[in-house]
Image: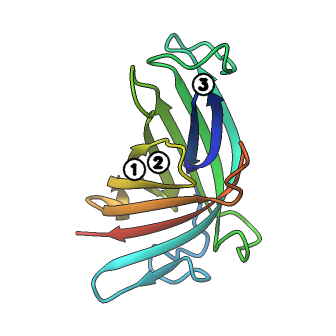
Amino acid sequence: MMIGKRVCESVGSKQFRCTMAVASAVFVGAGLAGGSVAGAATRRASSVQVLHFFSEAQTMTFSTAAGKPFSPSKANPPAAGDEIESTDLDYVGNHLHHAAKWTVSDHLLCIFPAKGDPVCHAQIAIGGSMILLRGLATRATSTPFVITGGTGQFNGATGSLVSVNIDPNSDSSDSDLTIKLRRP
């Protein structure tokens, strides 16, 4: 999810990092739907499920509050209402060891407020169900998000996601995602 993944742009004294993205996914083998998929999920007795993904950036766009594309820079910084939108393909595992094919996708939309870090909303699609998240795009190399709910098997889910940039000095770093999921 581009919710914890690449620095979107260096603007003035701030760098905005988009670290997670989600859009649509087909979770082949139904690891979350019943079986187990190559270490993607680990069920614990406490009903916490931990998912690990390597998130590879696909798209990133910047739009003004009026919906027009733009390229932010020091001379043209984002203003209140401007947006960053991104998508990623996610592979079970991490950047050092992951599945050969993606099985999950994510989408991230961050909106710049008048002051402070952009507020981000993300969706992670896994096999016909979706996890919904919210967080802030910050300059940190590790970005936390809160699970706010979901659809299908994730209806009523809570928990967190942490996205860690592979290359903290890169403006387009891929990420490792760790999702800690609790279901009702």
Considering only vertical position in the picture, is 79 above or below 61? above
Between disc 2 and disc 1, the foreground one is 1
Disc number for residue 109 = none
Out of 143 and 157, give the one closest to the viewer.
143
Considering only vertical position in the picture, is 27 above or below 15? below
- The location of residue 162, given as percent across then percent down, is 48, 61
Quarter of the image with the C terminus in it: bottom left
Gap in angstroms between the C-alphas marked 2 and 1: 6 Å
Out of 169 and 145, give the one closest to the viewer.
169
Q: Amino acid at mark 3?
A: Gly
Disc number for residue 133 = 1
Q: Residue at x 36, y 65 (%)?
A: 153
Disc number for residue 12 = 3
Sequence-first tag of 3 and 1: 3
Q: Secondary structure at mark 2?
A: strand
Q: Which residue is mark 2?
A: 123
Judge whether residue 133 can be spotted in this image. yes
Q: Are marks 3 and 2 in contact (CB under 8 Å)?
A: no
Q: Residue at x 59, y 20 (%)?
A: 63
